[in-house]
Image: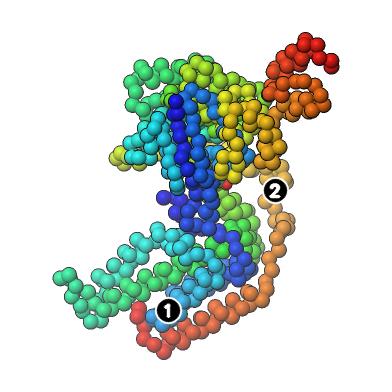
Amino acid sequence: MIKDITLGQYFPGDSFIHKLDPRFKLIFTVFVLVEIFLCKNFLSLGLIFLFSIACGLISKISFKVIMKGLKMIYLLIFFTSALQIFYNKTGTPIEIFGGKITTGGIFTAIFMAVRIISLIFVSSLLTYTTSPTALTDGLERLLSPLKKLHIPVDTLAMMMTIALRFIPTLIEEIYKIMNAQKARGADLENGNIIKRAKALVPIFIPLFVNSFRRAYELAFAMECRCYNGSNRRTRMKKMHTGWRDIVALCVVLLILAAIILLNHFFGAVI
Amino acid sequence: MTVLEAKNLSYEYSVGTPFQVTAIKNINLTVEKGEMLAIIGHTGSGKSTLIQHFNALFQPTEGQIFLNGKDINESKESAHAARFKVGLCFQYPEYQLFESTVYKDIAFGPSNMGLSDAEIDARVRRAAAFTGIRDDMLEKSPFDLSGGEKRRVAIAGVMAMEPEVLIMDEPAAGLDPRGRKTILELIKNYRETTGSTVIIVSHSMEDVASVADRIVVLNKGTVALSGSVDEVFSHADELVEMGLNIPQITKIFAELKKSGYDLNTSVYTSEQAKNEILRYLQKGGNA
Ligand SMILES: Nc1ncnc2c1ncn2[C@@H]1O[C@H](COP(=O)(O)OP(=O)(O)O)[C@@H](O)[C@H]1O
Ligand SMILES: [Mg+2]
């Protein structure tokens, strides 16, 4: 159900990770994602996996919540791993259920699964610990050199902020409309595909109508407060780089070094 | 006779996440057949959460709901049947209109009930009459109507199901004084004509004082007060503490009584106030 989508949601807090400068947090996340791809064996991957778990612990966001966000991805993980088992024919063959698989296949399958989990884990931590506004603000700052190329970075960032801001509103609205139509006897759960598709009409028409209305209202409200998308806008919240960012920078650099060493001195799985 | 009964009802949102909140807890409540019950409470007191249990849209975290003595969450069928027996009109219902014409939108509920075309037509016209929707409006697009008209179309959409119990969540919210009066009048008229049970949810005492038989006051998810309008209004101080207000006119009469005028203080509208003052003056009281 839509209720279970926690990916992209923000959980306020005041942990070390919450307090990192959003700009740096973005860079660190990209950095760690690259590091995950650099891993070539279980030692380096294990290191980065432990590191993601540690970040999760530091952020004080309950693992139950993070796992719930992963729910949608389980299938993806399962299929990627299953494919590896069947296609990778290196290593010692083993016979299971009459079929032939290999140790190499099993190892790569596990490797892929851990890699995907780490990727999702790290990227969801970014959105869980950074408010959407801070995130787009950070992104805007990082991309601001592109303004020289006449790319309207600030307008794009504003669009993204607004879009992110309205996702929860839209989800809430879908629920309200669904309940209102159910109260009039709309049947959303039963019937064949065509019937179910038809049942969506009473939900999506009001949703679109209301979204356009809201967009107009928001645009008017912004214009009334003299928003014109110019690049002369100043900020209410200043971003501060502090000791936390330097500590975090050292940690990710150390991990990079460790990964390169581990990759170099121990055999590669993939 | 009791139509609806809530027993030890509790509901929590977002169970198992950091956002878990208890919206209502341990609510016991009965609704008698044919009465007009008002559920009053400050914003966030759990009114909307409570009423969505009455037609099985929400399954209680704890407790039960009985409709005519039967647990409505007993089976999928009983829950589905409750949707038609208990008609629920949400807050700002005009944002849920979707059909190409007013007629079709009002007919949405009845046609989901699987009624014959003739019966649907009869119900749509009856509901339109109750809500003051003229015949020429029936063929218009609901999106071309004014705010107040849209609201009435949406209300007609629920009334057309001709439920045993009609629940209206904040029916007068966001309307101007005349619009509020119209809506309250039509609800009163609907009840008097059909004799159905009506539950009206509001955060405004002023709105419900003149129409309700009985009031239940919710505060922070529990029943704080319940009883006749007079009984509830006699707890003025507690009401104010809960962020609610008794009508201005009632306050004035309470003050007048305190300063020694022998007036009846159960006065909620300017009409009643006029009559009470006239009665007092005729009796020979000195002004
Ligand atoms: N969809 C929801 N998710 C989480 N909490 C909610 C939701 N809807 C309402 N609540 C919470 O439940 C409580 C009761 O809300 P509600 O029943 O809407 O009150 P009322 O209708 O009296 O204003 C409030 O504290 C509100 O924040
Ligand atoms: Mg409400």
Query: What's the chain of the residue with tag 2?
Result: A
Badge 1 residue CB within 8 Å of ligand 1: no
Q: Quadrant of residue B124?
A: top left
Label 2 CA crowd tier, 10 Å (few <14, some 14–19, many 20+) = few
For label 1, the SS is helix
Disc assigned to residue A227: 2
The chain letter for the residue carrying disc 1 is A
Where is residue A200 drawn, in percent x and y?
Answer: 40, 39
Q: Quadrant of residue B55?
A: top left
Residue, disc 1: A46
Q: Residue furthest bottom?
A: A265
- Residue at x 39%, y 72% (from the top left corner): A114
Q: Where does the C terminus of chain B fall, quadrant-wise?
A: top right
Q: CA distance from mark 2 to mark 1?
A: 49 Å
Q: Residue furthest right?
A: B287
Q: Nearer the viewer, residue B36 or A248?
A: B36
Q: Position of residue B23 (x, y in %)?
A: 54, 46
Q: Counting residues from the N terminus, which is met first, the one under dot 2 or under dot 1?
A: 1
Q: Amino acid at mark 2?
A: Tyr
x and y, in percent, of residue A18 in the image: 60, 66
| Picture coordinates of residue A47, whole percent (x, y) | 45, 80
Q: Nearer the viewer, mark 2 or mark 1?
A: 1
Closer to the camera in the image, A151 or B275: B275
Q: Neighbour class for label 1 at 10 Å: few (<14), some, many (≥20)?
A: some
